[in-house]
Amino acid sequence: MKPGIYVHIPFCEQRCYYCAFTIAVSPDHTYEPYVRRIVREIEISQFIDEPETIFFGGGTPSIIKAEFLETILRALPGGGTGAKELSLEANPGTLPAENLKVYRDIGINRISLGAQSFNDRDLETAGRLHKSSDVIGDFESLRRFGFSNINIDLIAGLPNQTISGWSENLDWIGRLRPEHVSIYMLDEEENSAWGKKGGRTPIDEELVRFYTDATDRLGNLGYVHYEISNWALPGFECAHNLKYWTGVPYRSFGVSANSFDGQYRFWNSSSLKEYADMVDSGSLPIAGRELLTRQMRLDEAFLLGLRQTRGFNIWRVAEDLGIQYPSGWFAAIEEMQRAGWVEFDGGVLRLAPAGWLLAGSITEELLWPTLLSTLSTSEATP
Ligand code: SF4
C-alpha cells in the first residue's frame, strides 16, 4: 500500500490556551528559511515512494504563503501530483481568496478548518483569534472555490460551555454540512497555558452529554461515526488518518515530525534551532528511533483498533504478531461485554457506544496484566 506523507508547518499567530503542540509564534520572514529546510530535508532523506495521501499540518499551514506549499509539494516524490488526498489544516481568518485559488491549482483537495466553536465567547475563552463569522465566511468561500471535501474541527468541554451552546455548534454542522467533522474532548495538557495554571479540567458528566449529543445529532444528519473522534459523510473518511490507524507506513518532514517505516518509528528534533542546524549540515534531523517490539505492536493494534468504531479482528493481530491469547483472557472480554462496554462476535472486537469515552481504560484493562505479560505462553490459538 502506498504511504502517506505528513509535512509539519509549526507556525501560529498565537498559542491557544489549550495547545501543547510544538509550535512557533515567529515573524513572517522566518517562514521562507523553514520551507527551504523542509525541501532540503526531503532531498537528504532520499525518500522516493510516491504517496497516496499528503497532509500539511501544524501549527497553522495556512499562514505561510500558498506558493511555499507548492514549493514543498514539488520537492516530494512524484511532485505531489499523484496523491489522491491532499489535505491542508487551516485556521478561519487565514484564507484569502488568492490563497484558495493557489491551493486549488496545486491540487489541495481537502481542507481541515480549525473552527473549534461557533460561539464567540468560547473562541475568546480558548485564546482563538477568529470569530464565528470567519468560520462561516471561510466555509462559504471554500465552497465557491470548489472545495468539496471540508473537515470542521470542534472542541467539546471548553470552560463555561453549556449544553445549549454546544448544541448550536451541531446546528451549524447541519446548516453547513461539511463532509467531515472531528470532535475533541478538551483535555488539560500539562504543557498548555491552561495545564500550567491548573483547574480547567472539564466535568466528566458534561463531556458525556456533549459527546452523546454529538453522536446522536451527527448520526441523524447522515454522518458515519468511523473513529471515536471522527465522523464523515459516506466516502469522506480521512484516508491519511486511516493510514495511521491501520499501521500503514508514513513519512513525515519538518520539526518534531514522526515517521513509521513498517518496523521503526523515528522522530525529528522538536527544537527549531536544532532542526535547522542538522539540516544545514546535511544530516537528517532525527532525534530518536525505536524498533517496535511485539509488545508495542500489540499495544498499538488494540489501541488503534478499538478507536475505530468497526473494531478489529483479534485473530488477525494474533497471526501478524505470532501471539496466543491466554484462555482466561476471554473471561475479561465476556465481563466487559456484560457491562455493555465492548462487543465481540468471536473474531471482531469493538467498543460498544457506552465504551467510546472509556477507550483508554478499556484498552489498558484488555492488555494488562494478562495479555502483554503472557506474550510467550502457548494457550488458546485461533
Ligand atoms: S491549537 Fe492549533 S492554532 Fe492553536 S496554537 Fe495550537 S496548533 Fe496553533
Image (spheres, rainbow, N blue to C red):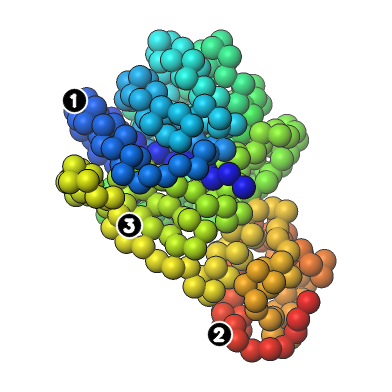
Residue of label 2: 373
Q: Report crowding for label 2: few under 14, some 14 to 19, many 20 or more residues within 10 A (C-alpha).
A: few
Can the viewer see residue 3?
yes
Q: Position of residue 46 (x, y in %)?
A: 38, 44
Q: Earlier in the sequence, mark 1 or mark 2?
A: 1
Tell me which residue sits at (60%, 40%) in the image: 239
Residue of label 3: 190
Quarter of image, res 13: top left
Horizontally, residue 68 falls left or right of residue 319, namely left
Q: Position of residue 61 (x, y in %)?
A: 37, 30
Question: Within 8 Å: ligand 1 and the Cβ of disc 3?
Answer: no
Horizontally, residue 327 falls left or right of residue 69, namely right
The reply to whether callout 2 and callout 3 are in contact (CB within 8 Å) is no
Horizontally, residue 304 falls left or right of residue 80, namely right
* Above/below status of 198 relative to 48: below
Residue of label 1: 29
Q: CA distance from mark 1 to mark 2?
A: 52 Å
